[in-house]
Image (cartoon, rainbow, N blue to C red):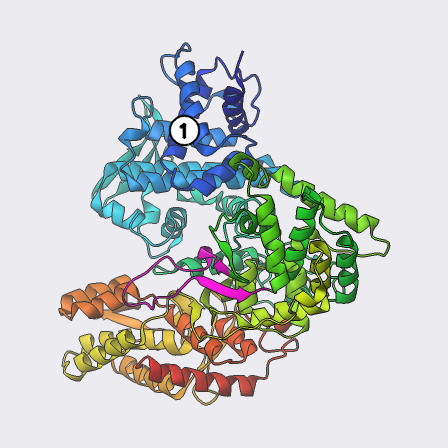
Amino acid sequence: MQNENEKEILKFGKYVCQQALNLDYKDDFALYNILKTLKITLYLNKDHEDLLEELLRQCEIKLDLPLFFKKLDQLLENLNGIPKQSILKKSPKQLQEAPLTWLYYAIYFSLDLENKTENDLINNSNIQNILLLVIKYHLSYIVYKKDERASKSPALYKDSTQTIVRITEYLLAFTLENNKKLNNIYFNTKQALDQNFFNLLEDQNSTEKNCFFIRHDKKIGNFLVYQNNELDIHIQIESSRMVRKGESRNDWKNTNIVHYILDGKQYYMQILQLIFHTSDGNGNGGNGRSGGIIQFTEEEEFLKGVIKQKVQLPEDFSHEDAIDALNRTKLKKRSFPTKEQKNIPNLYKQHQRNKAFSANITKRSLVLSVDYDIPPLPILKNFIHFLTKKPFESPLIIKDVYKTIFMIDTLLGLGYIKILDLFLQNQKIIKLEKNYLKIDLDSHLFSKQANSYLQETTRKIIYRVPYSLSLLINRIQHYFHDFTDIQKKEFYSEDKANEYFKFIKEQIKSYPKHIRFNPKHMWKILDSYRKTYLYEDMSTLFCIGRYQQNDTPKLAYASTNQRAQGHSNLIELLYEKLDMHTCSANLLEIEVSVFKKSIEFNTVSKYVGSGQVVVPQKSSMFFQSLKNLMMHEENEEKYFNLYTLYTRYAMSLLLGTRGYYNSANLNQISFELHAFIISEKSQTLLNGVRIIPMCKEIEDILRKYQVLAKRLCIPTDNIYLINNNKYEIYKTKNILNMLENYNVEQSLIDFVRLVPLNTGRHAITKLAMETNFNLFYLEAFMGHYIAGAEQMGIYSTLDMPNYISKVRSLTSNIAKIYGV
């Protein structure tokens, strides 16, 4: 008779095997090895506690993580005595319809887990990171498959899993090879390992795409190979799945496996992207949040013919740029399929595209007060009075807790989980001190890079709440005071959350008047009211920790006052309009006159937000050092490369460009109109167009660059470097090699290595927000503009002449501050 804990562990195996037919969980040798591989995979990433706990939750495992590991060890010890086959079969037939098992078979064979334990692998960080990819995919796979709206096509699950299987097998083989050159290519990267792998295989300038093959040997059959003649590396890959075909001169797709791997990429991304945004999460906000309902981007009727375009990430992209790029991949891109993708759509199709995009933005992104799920303030006020007409029971009961959660969520938009953190005083993200809240900003929005060249920034925002609300919170905190840890943790369960939402829905039904809203999305109501009363949005979005798709990229660059006076004023306004002071007094059975309606707050100009703003003094020293070097440089090629470096960082700071291939495309530039037009993330100017005003400083720099390029017979359509009389597009790794050869000061090399090319976007946004710059102009400058979905044309609401004038003034100040 199995005990309950053993059943829970076996349930995990069942979930992984997707209930494969005729699988005997007690006697099957395959299950033992899957569970063993699972255990090692999870254990090597035990520091990612939240991710692992969410995986257990999605697999319906009702065990804490430490207990899970302990019981899993005991179960494996018991199962270790089962009869073993002489060799573990690859891809057992009974698991062919269970794609997740393929992943763990891949790990089992690649790492030779028949003869190794987690202790043999724990010091290899590359292996840990590869297995982290597997865990994230595992979680995304389950979340995706459980949702009723997800695709049910078996091909999607099989092809996407086949893709991550191949990536896993190759990366594990590479790290075990322990070759320094291979490590530099595949592991010493700021990108996620899978994204870097895809980029290398898709980059037309990369030789890596020619190194992956299927080969055949009469003795061992078909096998996978990595063969890099340039680096003199040849690796035979131990595949966990049968390779059906071998080398064939007539079948290029079979010989070179790159295309075979990339075939499943779009399905792999489709499954992964669903966890990047949630409409209701654990209260932490941002990307990668767990425990929430998936926020799908529904396809509008207009968008049926619109295609998605691939995003090629630059070599030195940052965390927020990656998220930005992925978000834009999820959105329906504004181009239409034609027989040849290079053809430009005709005017009619362009008109359809713009209309479709505008309709989609308006319907999905704006959260207007005319939305049926956004009740007018007077009606919501009456509902809150209806909900709180009876004082708290003595002693308190659970319904009193639910009423308080609803009041706080209505006013602050924090969500069920974060409010629980406040009540239970977990203090991981949010805590109450007197009558102000301190909230840690969502770390997913910011780059993890930190060095002396980038400005330090705090990641905590503070705002006041009404005194009566703090009394309510204190009362509920006292209610939980004598609860055990187990009892407290129960409130975080999905069942308890659903019990709360069910209670509110019952109150809505019993309310004598008609009111409609979703209690899971109270933050949207708050955000709608914010827009109605024209309050600044950045501090509010930071405070509530919930963003829509278009909010995330702009928040990654954003800056706001740490002491969020604007948000405090909004809270005070809504508190009064909803008459919450009366409701609070009624619940607490205290005279209304005891409460103050107003919030007293002293503003301190300390800004929080982006952590990738270059330190002004370091920037000034960088540009001055380049000027000094160029002043005494007689070699024409070296002078040009130094000036190219100067130009690229000047463009970053004064035009807000990034490290993408098209970020420095100079084909669309007008010195007369003071405008620079690029489309950074696609191969055509029909998509993601940015119209960037140019201040006098950047105009002078670009004019001089073009003069130098023409003198050396170099094209002026982009920013180039010269290497042995050959020109090439600017790349950070190439300029770093040149600087090493030039024997320049180490500080100059460190600046290029540690300051990303998107630093200007952070610096410009920071100054703009701290000087109350027009946010519509800022969003247009950054490429986040959505009013009418375009900056020019019949749907545009942008005042272009004023936009150009104001931005030129702003970036001219940036030039002075950062010494350009």
Q: Is residue 227 left or right of residue 667?
A: left
User: Does residue 579 lie above or below 262 as drawn?
Assistant: below
Instruction: Give the residue at the far right of this rendering.
Output: 512
Quadrant of image for the N terminus: top right
> Magenta segment, which residues?
438-465
Verify whether residue 454 appears in magenta: yes
* Residue 748, position as x, y percentages in the image: 21, 70
Quadrant of image for the C terminus: bottom left
**Residue toward you, 24 or 712:** 24
Q: Is residue 387 visible?
A: yes
Which residue is drawn at the image coordinates 53% and 28% (left, top)? 98
Count of numbered badges drawn on the protein? 1
**Residue toward you, 504 or 142:** 504
What type is the residue that disc 1 sits on? Lys
Instruction: Give the residue at the far top of this rendering.
Output: 83
* Residue 340, position as x, y percentages in the image: 54, 59
Residue labelled with disc 1: 39
Which residue is drawn at the image coordinates 54% and 20% (left, top)? 4
Q: Is residue 89 visible?
A: no
Q: Is residue 336 left or right of residue 429?
A: right
Which residue is drawn at the image coordinates 43% and 77% (left, top)? 767
* Residue 52, position as x, y percentages in the image: 46, 38
Verify whether residue 649 appears in magenta: no
User: Does residue 576 lie above or below 197 as drawn?
Assistant: below
